[in-house]
Image (cartoon, rainbow, N blue to C red):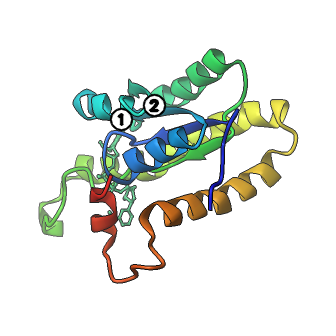
Amino acid sequence: MRIRFDGKTVAVSGAGHGFGRCIAETFAQRGARVFGCDLSAAELVETATAGVEAEVVDLSDRVAAAAWIARIEQTTGGAVDVLVNNAGGVAGQEMHPIEEVEDADWDRIFAVNIGAAFALSRASRKSGSQQTPCWREQDSNHRSRLRKVVDAKFQRRSDPGRSNTDFGRRC
Ligand SMILES: NC(=O)c1ccc[n+]([C@@H]2O[C@H](COP(=O)([O-])OP(=O)(O)OC[C@H]3O[C@@H](n4cnc5c(N)ncnc54)[C@H](O)[C@@H]3O)[C@@H](O)[C@H]2O)c1
């Protein structure tokens, strides 16, 4: 299956690594203009080699997250067609016993997993509602298309025993 995204603007959060990089690269290969952000400048260097317009943004800052969407819209002169809220994880708390997790660490996990998804979605939706009246329909189409692209890329259906981590490493 070859689904194309020519002429579409795609924003991928957490594009420096793992699933996010892979998703960003795949959209770029399929014709989209892709913007990716992450905390890590070093990791974004590799993402950028795939044609992704990469930028360091700390998405735990909701103002910075919304400003990134605004910069994309300014650069492209239009709304974001596909937003992939990928950034997340446990902010360095892997395998930490709960009694050792500080409030600030807990808040940071929510800031990136929940707060950033909210801030990016709200910022995209604000301009999307003005510039693309069919935003909701487009959004639902793109979600199912994205799933197909990811499945096709990793041949997940033909290799169901492989773990998610293995899929991320393939990129
Ligand atoms: N890997 C899995 O098995 C798995 C399972 C379920 C859900 N997920 C979710 O899928 C997403 C991607 O998973 P992954 O394994 O590729 O994770 P990952 O940790 O490899 O990548 C997440 C990316 O988000 C970036 N990020 C983290 N905090 C950020 C911040 N404040 N601002 C900007 N960027 C930030 C990281 O730098 C990293 O590049 C995550 O949201 C994760 O929680 C992953």
Single out the residue that lies furthest toward the right: 133
State the separation of the CA atoms marked 2 and 1: 6 Å
Q: In the rendered view, would you say 72 is above or below 31?
A: above
Residue annotated with mark 2: 52
Q: Nearer the viewer, residue 41 or 112?
A: 41
Side of 34 where 123 appears, left or right: right
State whether residue 146 appears in this view: yes
At label 2, counting other C-alpha atoms closer than 10 Å, the crowd grade (few under 14, some 14-19, many 20 or more) is many
Q: For numbered disc 1, what is the local secondary structure?
A: helix
Residue at 41 percent of width and 36 percent of height: 59
Judged left or right of residue 83, residue 6 is right
Residue under label 1: 47
Does the beta carbon at disc 1 come under 8 Å from ligand 1?
A: no
State whether label 2 is within 8 Å of ligand 1.
no
Among numbered discs 2 and 1, the one appearing first in the sequence: 1
Q: For the residue marked with disc 2, what is the amino acid?
A: Val
- Note whether residue 58 is visible: no
Question: Would you place residue 164 above or below residue 81 in this image?
Answer: below
Residue at 26% from the left image edge and 35% from the top image edge: 43
User: Where, by quadrant of the figure, is residue 133 drawn?
Assistant: top right
Q: Quadrant of residue 147?
A: bottom right
Measured as percent of width and height from the top left, residue 124 is found at 66, 36
Residue at 50%, 27% (x, y): give it.
Answer: 63
Q: Mark 2 near mark 1, Cβ–Cβ under 8 Å?
A: yes
Query: 126 or 32: nearer the eye?
Result: 32
